[in-house]
Image (cartoon, helix red, strand yellow):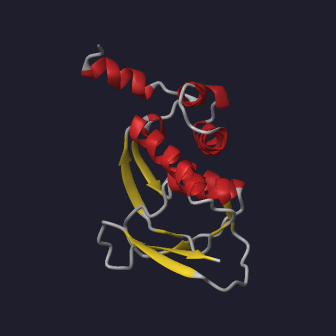
Amino acid sequence: MYGKSSFQDIKLKRNFYAVKEILEDSKLTNSAKQRTLKIFEIIAKAESKAHGVNFEDVIFHENGAMDSIIDIVSFAVCLESLKVKNVFAKNLCEGHGEINSRVGKLPIPTPAVKNILQMFNLEVKSLDVPYELITPTGVACLAAVANFTPKNYIAKNVGYGNGKRDYNLPCVLKVEEI
């Protein structure tokens, strides 16, 4: 059994290949594994650029923690379970300021978020709020599956999800079935 400090050390040294091994040993479907790996690959490429290291040398910090792996796997499994064929995204917004991370203070948007936005040529509207609105995990999930080209459609069903934080502005995700 690992002590707390040993577990922390192992958790902080997880790279793309360690995450891949965890997924390969799982009972996930192949498509959920592939989608999850695609998301982690996007994050690893962004972190590689941010830290000036080779892809193989990227150590996931927040994203290597088991809760982040579960978040990304859950996203992939949810899309599969719901039989989602297309994802369209628009109106990404980001705040400003700094956040505390395991590697110290980072600007908002974080370097990894900026790199993913650049990799996929995604536009972001800057809001005058001193908060992080886009995380590397969130934007990597979107980048892996979404089409950011505007499309005309008629919604069959609409659902809303409310965030938990109070930013004095709507913290809502809108999902439409087309």
Find residue 104 and report its horizontal and vertical position in percent: 38, 41
Residue 158, above or below 55? below
Quarter of the image where one finds residue 146: bottom right
- Is residue 54 shown to the viewer in this render? no
Seen at 72% across and 84% down, the residue is 152
- Residue 143, picture quadrant: bottom right
As displayed, is residue 164 above or below residue 51? below
* Front one among 175 and 100: 175
Q: Please say whether residue 9 is visible from this viewpoint.
A: yes
Q: Identify the residue at image location x=47%, y=76%.
A: 159
| Rendered residue at 49%/48% (across/down) | 74
Furthest residue in direction left, as rendered: 3
Q: Is residue 146 left or right of residue 170?
A: right
Q: Is residue 108 left or right of residue 82?
A: left
Quadrant in which the N terminus appears: top left
Residue ranking furthest to the top: 1
- Classify residue 165 by image quadrant: bottom left
- Locate the C terminus and report the quarter of the image it occupies: bottom right
Residue closest to the eye, 47 or 165: 165
- The x, y position of residue 89, in whole percent, is 62, 70
The percent position of residue 167, horizontal first and vertical second, equals 33, 73
Residue pictured at 29% horizontal, 71% vertical: 166
As displayed, is residue 4 above or below residue 165? Answer: above
Residue 106 is situated, as x and y percent measured from the top left of the image, at 43, 49
Query: Which residue occupies the foreground of this view, 41 or 117?
Result: 41
**How many marks on residues?**
0
Q: Nearer the viewer, residue 105 or 78?
A: 78
